Amino acid sequence: MTSTVVATATDRRAARAAEGRLRRRSPRRRGRGGLIGLLFALPFILVFIAFGVGPLLASAAMSFTDMTVSDIRNPLGVDVVGFDQFAQLFHDRLFWQSLGVTMTFVLLSVPLTLAAGLALAVVLDRGIRRFRALFRVGFYTPVITSIVAVAVVWRYLLQPDGIVNSALETIGIVGPNWLNDTRTALPALVAMSVWRGMGNMMIIFLAGLQAVPRETLEAASVDGAGPWRSFWSVTLPQLRPTMLLATVILTIGFLQIFEEPFVMTGGGPLASTTSLSLFVYNQFGYGKYAYGTAAAYVLFVIIAALAVLQFRVLRSKEN
Amino acid sequence: MVTSVTAGSQHSIPATDDGAQRKDNGVFQRRHTHRITGLVTLGLTATLVLAGCGRADDPGMDVEVGAIDSTPAVGDIEIWAAGDFGVQAADLFSAFEAVNDAVDVVVTDVPWTEINSKVTNAIAAGTVPDLVLIGDVSQLIPTGGIQPVPHGVVEDGAVYENALKRSQNQNGVQYGMPWYVEARMLWYHTKIAQAAGVQAPTTWDEQTAFLQKLGEVDGVDWAVGMPVGHASFAYQAIMPFFAQAGGSALTPDGTAWDLGSEAMVKALAYYKSFFDLGLANPDASTDNAVQTFVSGQVAATFQGSYLAAVLDQAVKVDGFSAATFTADVRPAGAVNNAAYLGGATWVVPTGSKNADSAWKLVKWLQEAPQQVSMFQITNNLPSLTSTWTDPAVATDAFMKAGIAQMSNTVSDVPVPTWSQVLAVIDAESEKVVRGGTTPEDAAATIQQRAEAIGLGW
């Protein structure tokens, strides 16, 4: 305990010294340095404004109008309807269903992916000595495969007479119709997303685990803590910033889940796997641009709110 | 400000800590001001943009229909073709270039699933090609992004009427020229039918009995393939049954939906019976629909004449003849035996730089010799009805049924909101099969939702 506080105090002193050095530079040189830096960054800033901020503002404005596909040749020739689109959205049964599906999916996938990634990272960090690189590559490969190819293959695997059910039959379980049963379709997608996402989490947690100082763990084992206790009380609190990063990334990604339901189930059966992103996609397909944009911004607000919540809960106490 | 210090570092930090805190507050206030300024600027910009919006009073869809003359086509013609027929028909376009020296035709194939969004994007950006081969035209008409067909492209009555209706607006103005058409017929394995000892059915009841007998033959898992749900386009199975029972999607004056009638209830009930009687697999995937039909696991299917080309490829090993598969006109419901009509239509976008030559190319393609060539290359039934008696087309083994079926077809409803309404039909019919909804409730829900969606004109 003492060693970490001392380390932090030393860091603070060093940081303050560096700040002092910076303040002592002449203001004019700092101003010119700033201008040159700005010039270097200008190309990126312009491109970002044109292709990032511009469309963002345009779509936000669009969600307050009644624009449909008929207006594409004259986008300003639409009526401003205020919050009508949002009001209509909240009366839409399909919107609420897709919101429920998305939240269920996130609530199931995020903890499972985190746990799987953490377990893999712990095992690879301390447990496996040989072929560690091979295991890392093997577990990371699902992350970099094409989602469409993966989804198509999984769709074949999960057919009623597919490999998964055949394997279950050998141990005497009659497998359900995974992708056509409303009770198992979403869990099947959760399982696939966990499988795909845990490699990413494994890499992040591996990096986080490297930063846990060995001395602390040795001190804990000297004090008589077993492996589980030292993991729970020493390693996990050290992993708080990593956990925050991983959770926020995962939540933002999973709240926008689209390709898995799109390719594997098309949103069915009976809309039980239609995520909010798929709902927005369908609205754009019907030409209801303003309506779809409104739904997309509701999703944006939810993502932002959840990210803020996670920052508050998982923020490092030493800040 | 959090100060998690212990006794060890307390004596050296506090003074600097307060100083740091004051400095942090200053920085924070500066950032705070910047943030507020930024937000206000954004808000002002957004308000200014929105203030510039507003619908002009609609002068009505007053459409000017032009005409083409007999001078030859000139210049570059850029074509986007849905499916892969552009590449297949390259020889046809080369022949047009040979007849018109000053013309250069460039064809790009676009997948069916992408063509509508690609064209919509091009209309919005103003980067439209000269000619597009597309399926769903109705959604594009209200954008003003496609031109009406000028006079002189085809003679009146030469092209199949039902196909022409697919690309008309609510006032009957023609916006596209159908190139080829196809209707979904009943296909089945000839040998399996012989083994079951059944004849081709002509009524709904006969069809059920026919399929039941087919399903009992050894080696057959399912009697017929039926789509379920939105991913499988179930509406393409429902709408023919609906029409066969006497239903019509729109009221006679074409101003409102009429999807909740008794005909829809009958259609949904008949559709449900296929699954209740174990004739069709409710969990079948469209991925292997053709494969399972070819292998004989599924004895019958409803597909268009395009299946002939697909079967040809798939059964190359075993050889393929009219004896292996039979295509038949659909059995009739209470009123008729309408089949689902598909096909592709030529449209010319507004703002095309060479619209005149594009329409001249379409006129040339619609002439009988070119339509027959198109059939021979792509195996799709031409939209020009006079070719249906041409020996090259009519003697084809599967075209006989395809041509006979043309006397009764039902197509996509030509209104801009059809893609939304068909999704409702898909969803409700899926509930009938999987969710335990009764056909009466489903029909009522379909009508209710369709009314809320409207026609879109």
Image (cartoon, coloured by chain):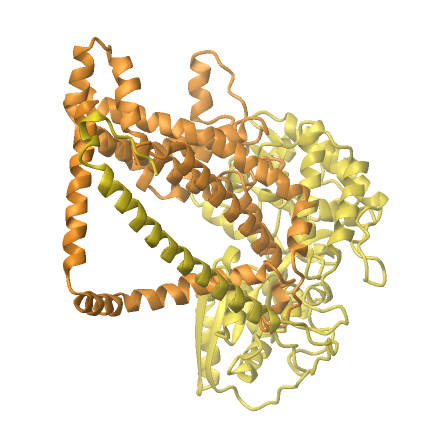
Whether residue A108 sits left or right of residue A287 in the image: it is left
Residue at position x 30%, y 25% from top? A237
- Does residue B401 appear in this view? no
Q: Quadrant of the N terminus of chain B?
A: top left
| Residue B309 in view of the camera | yes
Q: In the image shown, does A64 or A66 lie closer to the viewer?
A: A64
The quadrant the C terminus of chain B occupies is: bottom right
Q: Position of residue B138 (x, y in %)?
A: 66, 64
- Between B59 and A248, the one nearer to me in the picture: A248
Q: Nearer the viewer, residue A161 or A306?
A: A306
Q: Is residue A7 left or right of residue B17?
A: left
Q: Residue A219, relative to residue B275: is it above or below?
A: above
Name which residue lies at 52% across and 43% down.
Answer: A302
Q: Position of residue B141 (x, y in %)?
A: 65, 69
Q: Position of residue B131 (x, y in %)?
A: 53, 74
Q: Colour in which chain B is shown?
A: yellow
Compared with residue B398, is residue B344 higher up or lower down, i.e. above or below? below
